């Protein structure tokens, strides 16, 4: 199975693009950098996990992705 076929990868990939668009004019560059990196790390870690051979490594990267979800939620709460 390819990670590009997974809904769990597609949705945060689209969200990442939307975050970049929404924040394109934001002048708080530190916050903008942090939130865009958090958003992009979710699908990136899923992709990296699926690129690994062992199940343990795959699980580690899926856990990193889950952590990035929590980080992004926190940043979104503080965005508004």
Image (cartoon, rainbow, N blue to C red):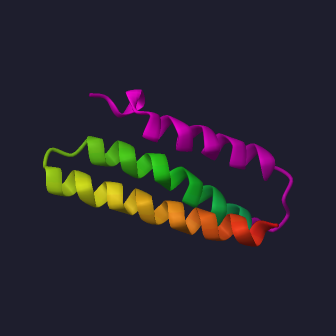
Q: Is residue 26 magenta?
A: yes
Image quadrant where residue 3 sits? top left
Q: Is residue 10 magenta?
A: yes
Name the residue: 48% across, 52% down: 42
Image quadrant where residue 72 sits? bottom right
Name the residue: 39% across, 27% down: 5
Q: How many marks?
A: 0
Name the residue: 70% across, 49% down: 19
Compared to residue 5, the image places residue 15 above or below, namely below
Question: Could you tell whether 29 is left or right of 10 in the image?
Answer: right
Per the rendered image, the range of residues in magenta is: 1-30
Name the residue: 16% across, 57% down: 56
Q: Nearer the viewer, residue 28 or 54?
A: 54
Question: Could you tell whether 31 is left or right of 52 in the image?
Answer: right
| Quarter of the N terminus within the rendering | top left
Residue 8 x/y as whole percent: 44, 41
Q: Nearer the viewer, residue 24 or 39?
A: 39
Compared to residue 40, the image places residue 3 above or below, namely above
Compared to residue 11, the image places residue 40 above or below, namely below
Residue 2 x/y as whole percent: 31, 29
Of all residues, the one furthest to the left in this rendering is 54
Magenta stretch, main secondary structure, is helix
């Amino acid at each position: 199975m390819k990670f590009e076929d997974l809904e769990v990868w597609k949705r945060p990939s689209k969200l990442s693009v939307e975050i970049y668009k929404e924040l394109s004019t934001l002048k708080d560059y530190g916050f903008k950098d942090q939130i865009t990196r958090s958003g992009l790390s979710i699908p990136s870690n899923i992709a990296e996990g699926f690129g690994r051979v062992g199940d343990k490594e795959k699980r580690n990267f899926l856990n990193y992705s889950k952590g990035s979800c929590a980080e992004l939620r926190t940043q979104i709460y503080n965005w508004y």
